[in-house]
Amino acid sequence: MNRKMIGKLIKKYKEIIMYLIFGVLTTLVNWFCYAFLTKSGMEMNISNCIAWLVAVLFAFITNKVFVFESKILKLRVIFNEFIKFVGARILTGAIEIGGLPLLYYLGMNQQLFGIDGFMAKIVVSVVVVLLNYVFSKLFIFRIKKEN
């Protein structure tokens, strides 16, 4: 594969590549926040909710600016995008908040990095990242440039 071909592939799949990069970063923000709060003695579900909130704020900014390149800075548009974004994240957040203890209860309670149930956290995170891309792509950041 030569440089020109790689450049074409990157250009063609830029949005997906950027989403994956910032999806991983958002997931890491979520996991580190969750791990820190859990290790600090906070209850698992409360840690999970706070980690989710922090990750949603990080994701909105990075998705708007870097992934979907929604460049409209009119307050009305930003507010509309933010409301839709938060609505979609509430749906996927409910999946995460309900999915983590469900998977834990169903036996996915293995320790990873010294934290009980972290394997369940990883599985839930993968599902959530995929759903978040679909919602962002199809319903939230459809307009890239101001006319």
Image (cartoon, rainbow, N blue to C red):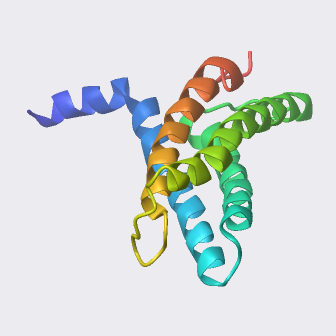
* Relative horizontal placement of residue 135, taking residue 5 as reference (left or right): right
Residue 107 occupies quadrant: bottom left
Q: What is the total number of numbered labels drawn onto the structure image?
A: 0
- The residue positioned farthest toward the bottom in the image shown: 40
- The residue positioned farthest toward the left in the image shown: 1
In front of the other: 61 or 51: 51
Res 68 visible: no
What residue is rendered at 67% in x and 49% in y?
A: 97
In front of the other: 6 or 147: 6
What residue is rendered at 70% in x and 32% in y?
A: 71
- How far across and how far down the image is residue 124, in percent? 51, 46
Residue 36 occupies quadrant: bottom right
Residue 146 occupies quadrant: top right
144 is higher (above) or lower (below) than 88: above
Res 111 visible: yes
- How far across and how far down the image is residue 127, in percent? 49, 38
Q: Give the quarter of the figure containing the N terminus.
A: top left
In front of the other: 28 or 6: 28
What residue is rendered at 27% in x and 26% in y?
A: 8
- How far across and how far down the image is residue 98, in percent? 66, 45
- How far across and how far down the image is residue 48, in percent? 66, 60
What residue is rendered at 47% in x and 63% in y?
A: 118
* Relative horizontal placement of residue 127, taking residue 14 as reference (left or right): right
